[in-house]
Image: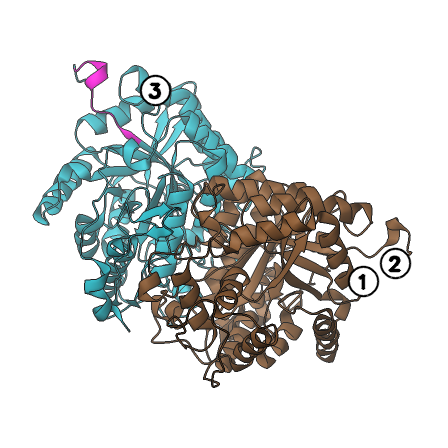
Chain colours: A brown, B cyan
Amino acid sequence: MSEAPLSTRRQMRLGAFVQELGHHIAAWRRDDATHHGYDLQHYVEIARIAERGRFDMLFFGDSLGFQYPEDEALGRTSRVLRPDPLTVLAALVPVTQHIGLVATASTSFIPPYLLARQFATLDHLSGGRAGWNIVTSTSDTEAWNMGLAGLPEHDERYRIAEEFMQVAKGLWDSWEDDAFVADKATGRYFDPAKLHVLGHEGHYFRSRGPLNAPRPVQGYPVLIQAGSSSAGGQFAARHAEVIFAAQQSIEHARQFLAETRVRVAAVGRDPAQVLVMPGVMPVVGQSRAHAQERVEQQQALIQDDIGWALLKRHIGGFDLSHLPADAPVPELPPTQGNLSRQRLLLEAARAEGLTVGQLFRRVAGTRGHWLVAGTAQDVADELQAHFEAEAADGFNIMAPWLPGSLSDFVEGVVPVLQQRGLFRTQYTHTSLRGHLGLSRPAHPSPRPFSQRSAQAAA
Amino acid sequence: MSEAPLSTRRQMRLGAFVQELGHHIAAWRRDDATHHGYDLQHYVEIARIAERGRFDMLFFGDSLGFQYPEDEALGRTSRVLRPDPLTVLAALVPVTQHIGLVATASTSFIPPYLLARQFATLDHLSGGRAGWNIVTSTSDTEAWNMGLAGLPEHDERYRIAEEFMQVAKGLWDSWEDDAFVADKATGRYFDPAKLHVLGHEGHYFRSRGPLNAPRPVQGYPVLIQAGSSSAGGQFAARHAEVIFAAQQSIEHARQFLAETRVRVAAVGRDPAQVLVMPGVMPVVGQSRAHAQERVEQQQALIQDDIGWALLKRHIGGFDLSHLPADAPVPELPPTQGNLSRQRLLLEAARAEGLTVGQLFRRVAGTRGHWLVAGTAQDVADELQAHFEAEAADGFNIMAPWLPGSLSDFVEGVVPVLQQRGLFRTQYTHTSLRGHLGLSRPAHPSPRPFSQRSAQAAA
């Protein structure tokens, strides 16, 4: 353990990753699940718990649609409902004071002007608390809903995302920070020399601008990304300020963080301005046995048919539901799709001697994320070990059921982290950038409107 | 005046039409203008005033961009800033309890799935208070920002809007009202027979569905429209439940309302389920002279260069700024564009013997809307006369400066209307449909998922 005095110790960042009723597939079946995913009061409660825990941010996932489970499992999941995250986060602005408000939004389907404006609005209304988790979407379902015949292929999605960021940043920079003088006496509302017309005409997008929003309080909302593919990693190196990672072992996580810093430096950015925050699913108990019991009770709520359906999706389409649940995991040939993830999963299952029933419960329960079960001290120890090994700058807490298991974390683990000087006891900033220690991007260009208007005229 | 007892009297509806600092172009120059258009506290104050006045709804306009004023006026208007209305209204949910929350959104640029989901989310979070003012947009500026080379022509915009509504309603009907059973014991979250996959493949849009939102609390958000063109009128007859009109004289307004009811009946809808609410800009004073003085003080804040620029835009591009402000309005040849509006404006100006300076102040001050200045009694009399002549079902109050002149209306005029039994003294419903007396649309189709899935598969 580090011997640095508490006051100067490097501190971890914490996000509360919100997924409706919880990250566990069967969270809705718990006795204490009293809300549904479109219930504002549910999110108000979550937000208050996270803010009481001095979290850096609320982090909302998103999907513009859902994949049908197999026919036999149809009707067995609450995952078919997901509210628009920007709308929910806007509604949380007046009931929170400090916590960052991060919405996931895809660059694959939405006009950049609209998204740039909605994030600018959220950032202004919240006094600088907005963040954007940039995704490119992963399912044809979303593409079909949003007007495409199918999802563009992986690397093209990142080329689209790259151009999207160019447009979004250009629109946020439509006005210099001090463009609005609002001089009532002279009747001058803004300084025309501080207006910048983007005039973007690219391969995937066109947008003239300017945005009808002042530059966001934070310059840009905090930019967050999860890509761990090659294209995703390059994209993150260029744009991300927070990277939401899914690595599990401390060694893999250390390696990922070190590689990320190299990639960031290679594109000329300051590696200290990029935070890596893996997802972790905590289950806190009064004892280790109690925590384990809670995990098992939760796992027992997974029904076989939804378990088989999710397993099939995770192992490349093989239906194993004809096997008894206590059969050993069989050898399977590789398939198309996410080969490495599929192979890792099956190899791990065979190495541990799992039955297919145990495997589908693992898949359904954690979706491959890092589960930490134990006492509050145990969980704090585990996070501290990763943090101090430079395997993480902080963690995105994926409460398996909400709000209960987030509350357990805040009441149990956060005070331990605070006592150890590893986490803030009070908010010391008002913006999400402030909480995270990220600098505010300067306006890039002093070119006045008059020099750009000709080029921008359509 | 009607002799019906107060308790059974037909009552008017009131909307608070919010435009940032007010509908008057120079509202920002007032001494009491202390907020800017991206300031949440400003809208919280407006919302509280309107709810104290028992208004049916807050009604937010929108534009996805702005038209530049002429070069010499550049910098002289606050109209370059406009926040995303859905985001602002979501932030008002927790600080209001009853009032309807209406956002303007265009059908010309945004994927229907996204908009349908944002409105569904707002309706759920607010417990059934969402409304959508459907517009097709009117400026190339918006098209350029949103990725098009220019705005589709007028009638095509309405064909796009028509198909948009088909998709949006189909997506809102993705689930029957009682689809979600959430039976924890059996593990059934929803009834697959109550899931409806839209599978829309049309001329302008495709969207498979289902929406990942339960059917809105109100079935659909209240649908509002302002179209007074032929295509707009037909569209409104098919879809609108509230029509935001701009007619001024009582005779024109009566005629418009009567024609609207005929058009609505002709498409098989109940005319009683469509409310016509003209916009009105009230200026309330302690005396008529005081009200007139307030109008003149406000008008005096309009600067000549922005006045000339707006006049030029309203009369078909003619620059009259070489004339002295006290010159009579000259004869001008007709031009392209909105001919009838231009001709009406010029004819009225010459009939009244206005100077060009008086004309541009009128254009800049009210944008052709109905200005009513006087004591609280005067304003109430005027509204009552229109209301009882069946020239209006209610009014959309366009406060010239905000929040001050809305507050004047609520403190002064609303109590008079209430004393006369013309307006509610308490909210009696929880949804916007309830306030307006509009029925909830029934789910149109009992066809189960299994009969539609083949057709819907992409």
- The amino acid pointed to by label 1 is Glu
Q: Residue at x 22, y 63 (%)?
A: B450
* Magenta range: B4-13
| Cα distance in 3D space between marks 2 and 1 | 8 Å
Q: Which residue is mark 1?
A: A388
State which chain disc 2 sits on: A
Question: Hey, which residue is sitting farthest bottom in the picture?
Answer: A333
Query: Is residue A64 among the parts visible in the rendering?
Result: no
- Decide which of A236, B276 is in the foreground and name it: A236
Q: Which residue is mark 3?
A: B425
Q: Is residue A212 left or right of residue A420?
A: left
Tag 2 and tag 1, C-beta contact below 8 Å? yes
| Cα distance in 3D space between marks 3 and 1 | 63 Å
Q: Which residue is mark 2?
A: A2
Number of residues whose C-alpha sits closer than 10 Å to that of mark 3, classed few (under 14), some (14–19) or many (20 or more): some
Q: Is residue B288 left or right of residue A228?
A: left
Mark 3 lies on a secondary structure that is loop
Both labels 2 and 1 in a single chain: yes
- The amino acid pointed to by label 3 is Thr
Among the 4 quarters of the image, the one containing residue B56 = top left
Image quadrant for the C terminus of chain B? bottom left
- The amino acid pointed to by label 2 is Ser
Predominant secondary structure, magenta span: loop
The x and y percentages for residue A101 are: 59, 51
Q: Residue at x 34, y 55 (%)?
A: B116
